[in-house]
Image (spheres, rainbow, N blue to C red):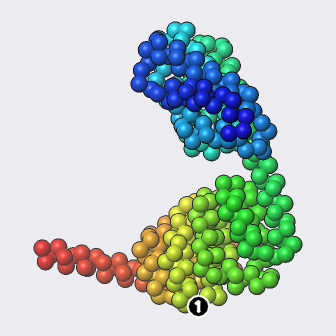
């Protein structure tokens, strides 16, 4: 446990006391405050640089300290604001601020949306106390600052990594970076741009056409489906690849997120980004070379998605038409007709079932 060994038993006992919520009596709260003080002091003595791994902090997170602190705020809300209650609140806030200095706690704090809770609930509840308000603001700044510093540092690291893959035209390396930086939108933008630029280099088109590679790319695009810059370039890449796939591989792409992703993009961006919607239609056009994908498209709401996009954007007669609107490629037009037939067949089957009953 590194520097934790000398006080391990004492801190362990204190931690168990903090996690124990069986009572909120005056005596229990005093015992809890004493235990919190032990943990706070140990955290303070364990502070290290942001890049260091701290086993003590990781252990506290695994045991549920962050959840216990937030639950404590909830438990204390209904109690009279006596000295013992205020002591507990202050120690909760100070401990959160200390935890916020460690990268190990960031994922847990993000998942619990700690900053929002502190801003919207805790700081309002104790706005009458200048000391608590000051400590809360410090805690929020610390947690936010640590997160931003780590994000910036990671972005720089991945940018350097990307430059190495760019030099070698290594598309699979870029795809790996996309997964490693899945929570960094700016890095995702860089990655898809690099993938497009190196598509026809170093055999990358063939490498990215493999099922596993396509699924990794689609997984990242689905994760960032609201990011127009990422998804537009991703749709261009998918369309390029789909145009050269065998019928069997194209069918696999369609039923494994390909169709559903394209339709979702039509729904999400029909009002805000006509160019992105057009690119989604080009991908649908490429997918519909295989008849099986038309049924998949119908099953994921393709007909409604295309019609909705056309309602929001005028239909162009062709690329030479000056109006700002959508071009319906030939295979999409045929797919729409086939999906309308499928709708009629489904309606007829439902009518038959009802009459039979």
- Report the residue marked by disc 1: 246
Q: Is residue 356 above or below residue 3?
A: below
Q: Residue at x 28, y 76 (%)?
A: 347
Query: Is residue 333 in sight in this rendering?
Result: no
The crowd level at tag 1 (other Cα within 10 Å; few <14, some 14-19, many 20+) is: few
Residue 196 % position (x, y): 75, 74
Residue 275 % position (x, y): 66, 68
Residue 91 sits in quarter? top right
Viewer-proximal residue among 321 and 235: 235
Viewer-proximal residue among 209 and 281: 209
Q: Is residue 203 above or below residue 354?
A: below
Lateral position of residue 133 relative to residue 53, left or right: left
Q: Is residue 144 above or below residue 128?
A: below
Residue 33 sits in quarter? top right
Viewer-proximal residue among 172 and 232: 172
Q: Residue at x 45, y 78 (%)?
A: 296
Query: Is residue 188 in sight in this rendering?
Result: yes
- Image quarter in which the N terminus is found: top right
Residue 309 % position (x, y): 53, 67
């Amino acid at each position: 446990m590194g520097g934790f060994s000398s006080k391990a038993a004492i801190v362990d006992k204190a931690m168990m006391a903090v996690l124990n919520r069986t009572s909120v009596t005056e005596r229990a709260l005093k015992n809890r405050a004493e235990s919190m003080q032990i943990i706070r002091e140990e955290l303070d003595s364990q502070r290290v640089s942001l890049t260091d791994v701290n086993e003590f902090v990781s252990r506290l997170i695994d045991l549920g300290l962050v959840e216990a602190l937030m639950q404590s705020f909830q438990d204390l809300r209904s109690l009279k604001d006596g000295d013992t209650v205020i002591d507990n609140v202050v120690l909760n806030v100070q401990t959160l601020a200390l935890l916020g200095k460690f990268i190990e706690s960031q994922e847990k704090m993000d998942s619990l949306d700690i900053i929002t809770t502190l801003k919207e609930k805790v700081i309002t509840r104790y706005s009458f106390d200048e000391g608590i308000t000051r400590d809360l603001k410090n805690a929020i700044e610390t947690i936010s600052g640590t997160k931003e510093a780590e994000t910036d540092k990671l972005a720089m690291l991945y940018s350097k990594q990307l430059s190495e893959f760019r030099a070698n035209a290594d598309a699979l390396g870029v795809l790996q970076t996309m997964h490693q930086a899945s929570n960094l939108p700016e890095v995702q933008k860089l990655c898809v741009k690099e993938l497009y630029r190196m598509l026809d280099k170093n055999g990358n088109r063939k490498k990215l056409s493999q099922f596993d590679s396509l699924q990794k790319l689609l997984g990242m695009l689905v994760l960032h489906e609201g990011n127009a810059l990422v998804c537009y370039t991703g749709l261009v890449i998918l369309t390029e690849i789909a145009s050269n796939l065998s019928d069997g591989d194209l069918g696999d792409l369609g039923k494994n997120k390909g169709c559903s992703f394209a339709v979702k993009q039509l729904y999400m961006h029909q009002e805000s980004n006509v160019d992105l919607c057009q690119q989604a239609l080009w991908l649908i056009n490429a997918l519909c070379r295989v008849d099986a994908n038309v049924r998949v498209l119908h099953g994921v709401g393709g007909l409604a998605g295309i019609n909705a996009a056309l309602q929001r954007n005028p239909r162009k007669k062709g690329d030479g038409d000056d109006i700002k609107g959508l071009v319906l490629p030939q295979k999409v037009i045929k797919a729409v007709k086939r999906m309308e037939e499928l709708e009629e067949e489904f309606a007829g089957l439902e009518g038959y079932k009802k009459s039979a009953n």
